[in-house]
Amino acid sequence: MYVRSNLRWPVIWKYAWKGVLIFTIYSSLICFFYSEMDQHWLSIPWQPVSTLGIAVSFYIGFKNNGSYDRYWEGRQLWGGIVNYSRTWSIQALEYVTSVVDAPGVDAPAASLSELSMRHRRLIYRQIAWCNAVRLHLRRQNDQWDQQVGPFLDPAESVAMQRKQNPPAHLLRQQAADLRVLREERGLLNDFQHVNMMQSLEQLYNLQGGCERIKNTPFPRQYAFFSFVFVWLFAALLPLGLIAEFEKMGPTHLWLTVPFSVLVSWVFNTIEIVGHTSENPFENEMNDVPMTAICRSIEIDLREMIGETHLPPKLAPVEDVLY
């Protein structure tokens, strides 16, 4: 996610230079053949070109709205992950506290050290789940040992890494631990158990929403034809402008080059903005900053269990928060 209020010129140029170069060369060739080679057949009426420009602007506006909706939904889903991670931690700390009345359960009282260990296990696995979801969405499973492994028991980490969908199985393990706490240890009553299972259900829903965006690409018919229409308009633009500028004087027709390049660059930039917003989980400049969100979750949850040696919040790298 780009965090600076204004885009730096190197960033603008990074996405613009290829198009500007092509538009400049093409417009210059049109002007050269028109003026120096007397190829006046290259000129076309301006009215059809302007009509096409209006139609293209509506089309790419529609496409960009759809692209932004995908990004914003992804950000909302990760906002939900933040909230339910905190909710889960509060439930783990406030529910798993002492022996409760559970029919048919004859469990010994849990010591403070045992409770602390169980709190840490439930909360650390939640931190692991957040990072596992991030790696799963970005297809970065090679970073498991550094990003997820430290929050799990070694045997559990190895077992989860072998799964096709590790975060789903981490939540499954959370549910298994809740069953043990209720049925075997007597540390949860039915109401508390149901509440915590509902939190797991919400986490599953949030993960599923992220996977839906990740695994369902933006409809190619909209994305492809948006690109085609923009470049078709850019190809016709100097043909429609050249006769209009020639009316101002023989030498004025060369104004076709800067003006056609400017208009074409604007349309192409709008198309690029939409394209870069289609997939918000690719670890690119304009994507949801999942790494920073995971770090914030880690800090919040570890503070809840009384830890003080915490990692710092992630800072933007060249104005980009990943």
Image (spheres, rainbow, N blue to C red):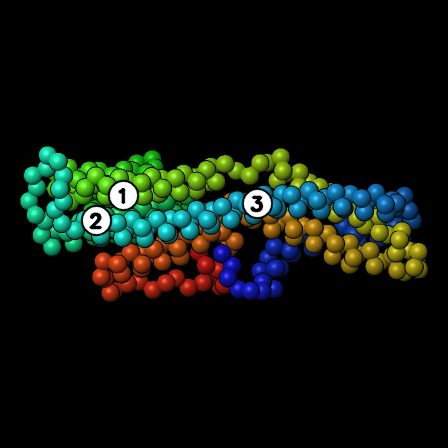
Give residue 247's position: percent from left, percent from top: 93, 56
Which mark's residue is nearer the viewer, 2 or 3? Answer: 2
Query: Does 260 sit left or right of 316 as displayed?
Result: right
Give residue 71's position: percent from left, percent from top: 52, 48
Separation (CA) of disc 1 from disc 2:
9 Å
Q: In this view, does 197 lie above or below 240?
A: above
Q: Residue 241 carries which label?
A: none
Mark 2 or mark 3, earlier in chain: 3
- Asked whether the beta carbons under mark 2 and mark 3 sit within 8 Å of each other, the answer is no
- Asked whether the beta carbons under mark 1 and mark 2 sit within 8 Å of each other, the answer is yes
Which mark's residue is nearer the viewer, 3 or 1? Answer: 1
Separation (CA) of disc 3 from disc 1:
35 Å
At numbered mark 2, what does the secondary structure look like: helix, strand or loop? helix
At numbered mark 3, what does the secondary structure look like: helix, strand or loop? helix
What residue is disc 3 on? Answer: 67
At numbered mark 1, what does the secondary structure look like: helix, strand or loop? helix
Query: Does 136 sit left or right of 230 as displayed?
Result: left
Q: Which residue is drawn at 66% across and 45% down?
A: 60
Mark 1 or mark 2, earlier in chain: 2
Q: Quadrant of residue 187?
A: top left
Q: Which residue is drawn at 25% across and 64% down?
A: 309
Q: Which amino acid does label 2 sit on?
A: Tyr
What residue is disc 2 on? Answer: 95
Q: Which amino acid does label 1 sit on?
A: Met
Q: Which residue is drawn at 9% across and 52% down?
A: 111
What residue is disc 1 on? Answer: 196
Label count reads: 3
Separation (CA) of disc 2 from disc 3:
42 Å
Query: Does 61 sit left or right of 257 as displayed?
Result: left
Badge 2 density bin: few <14, some 14–19, many ≥20, Cα 10 Å: some
Can residue 297 be seen here? The reply is yes
